[in-house]
Amino acid sequence: MTSGRRQISLEQWVIHPFDQWEKQWMVLAAGSFKEAHYNAMTVAWGSFGVMWGKPFAMVVVRPTRYTFAFLEKHQDFTLGIFAESYRPALQLLGSKSGRAGNKIAETGLTPVASLHVAAPGFAEAALTVECRKMYRQDMDPAGFIDPAIEKNYAQHDYHRMYFGEILAVTERMEGKKKI
């Protein structure tokens, strides 16, 4: 157990995915906490489910994002779920690049070690989902059945999808805020 966090079983984990992804967003972190070499970004598109008999989180990241290189180099990632009061920090993580400076420090969020993965979580996260990559695939526009999807890719910078097996979900113990 990391300081101030408690692991919860996947059977007890309750999430409202439509609200979580679309309205509240999450923080995707990849890299190595131990080596102090990681990055994080806000994500609003993805899913949770079961694939190949394993619980998973699926995230999508454009190759132009700084976090993309960390996802490619490392075998795992985390998703942090935050209370609404952290919206300004999440907006900053989604609008600035880690290439240009330490945007994580600017948010005031505190990176912490995860239980099972090298990628950091954040002390302020109400929930942290730890994932080990098990599949990745570039989106192919030839597969878009709904032509409206293409409007999301004016620059033809199609996302790469990452499926991560969920290894653990932890919740913040002290100072819990409703999410």
Image (cartoon, rainbow, N blue to C red):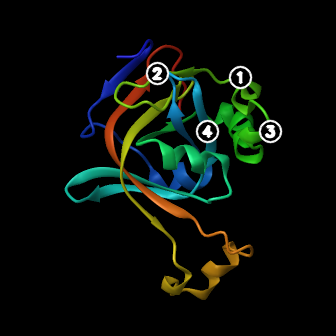
Q: Which mark is residue 40?
A: 4
Which residue is painted at 33% across and 43% down in the image?
166
Say if mark 4 contacts mark 3, CB within 8 Å. Answer: no
- Residue 95, visible in the rendered structure: yes
User: In the image, what residue type sits under mark 1?
Assistant: Gly
How crowded pointer 2 is (Cα within 10 Å; few <14, some 14-19, many 20+) is rated as some
Q: Position of residue 177 (x, y in %)?
A: 55, 25
Secondary structure under the numbered disc 1 in the rendered image: loop
**Which mark is nearer the camera, 1 or 2?**
2
Q: State the residue position of label 3.
A: 100
User: In the image, what residue type sits under mark 4?
Assistant: Ala
Say if mark 1 contacts mark 2, CB within 8 Å. Answer: no
Nearer-N-terminus badge (1/2): 1
Q: Position of residue 168 (x, y in %)?
A: 32, 34
Q: State the residue position of label 1.
A: 108
Q: State the residue position of label 2.
A: 113
